[in-house]
Amino acid sequence: MMRTSRILILAAVAICVGCGPTTKYYWGNYSKSLYDYQQNPTNQVTYQAALESIIASGDQTRKVPPGIYAELGYLKLSSGDSEGAVALFEKEKSAWPESALMMEKAILNAREGKNKAPAATGVTPASLPTS
């Protein structure tokens, strides 16, 4: 009898654990909004709103995915908001220490007025070709 109740308890725990979130990051509508933005760069406002939603929801529920703060920072930089971009680059650096070197360079460039992201082309830093 005691053995049966232990097995039932373990089965219930296993079922409950299996019902948890499948990822530790909140991606929201990222894939679709990025696709739409790359297809039509005039959708920058919608794309920016999607990134902001991911950050707001991710901060409350799960960890914000790597690169999201930086991506929103580049959008802000392309719109001329270098202070907002620097704040987001700092958040990226804090959340993801392995990005510190890249974020330091982005912060320096934003403060010096360099490296404006090409918003009008629909190309984001994550999708720029490497040579």
Image (cartoon, helix red, strand yellow):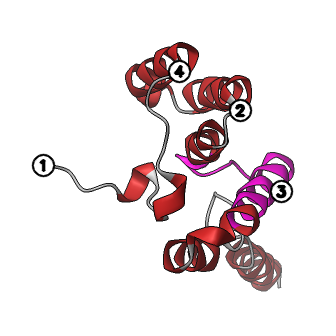
Q: Is 125 located above or below residue 85 in the figure?
A: below
Residue plotted at (74% across, 79% down): 19
Q: Looking at the picture, which amino acid does disc 1 mark?
A: Ser
Q: Nearer the viewer, mark 2 or mark 3?
A: 2
Please state the horizontal and vertical placement of residue 93, each as a whole percent of the image: 55, 26
Report if the CB atoms under discs 3 and 4 are less than 8 Å apart.
no
Please state the horizontal and vertical placement of residue 113, each as a whole percent of the image: 53, 21
Q: Looking at the picture, which amino acid does disc 2 mark?
A: Asp
Q: Closer to the N terminus: mark 1 or mark 4?
A: 4
Q: Looking at the picture, which amino acid does disc 3 mark?
A: Ser
Q: Closer to the N terminus: mark 1 or mark 3?
A: 3
Q: What element does badge 4 sit on?
A: loop
Left or right, 30 with reference to 16: left
Report if the CB atoms under discs 1 and 4 are less than 8 Å apart.
no
Left or right, 50 with reference to 123: right
Residue that badge 2 annotates: 81
Front-lying residue, 105 or 41: 41
Please state the horizontal and vertical placement of residue 95, each as a whole percent of the image: 61, 32
Front-lying residue, 89 or 20: 89
Q: Nearer the viewer, mark 1 or mark 4?
A: 4
Residue that badge 3 annotates: 57
Res 22 seen here: no
Q: Closer to the N terminus: mark 4 or mark 2?
A: 2
Q: Nearer the viewer, mark 1 or mark 3?
A: 1
Residue that badge 1 annotates: 131
Residue that badge 4 annotates: 113
Give the quarter of the figure containing the N terminus. bottom right
Main secondary structure along the magenta-highlighted residues: helix
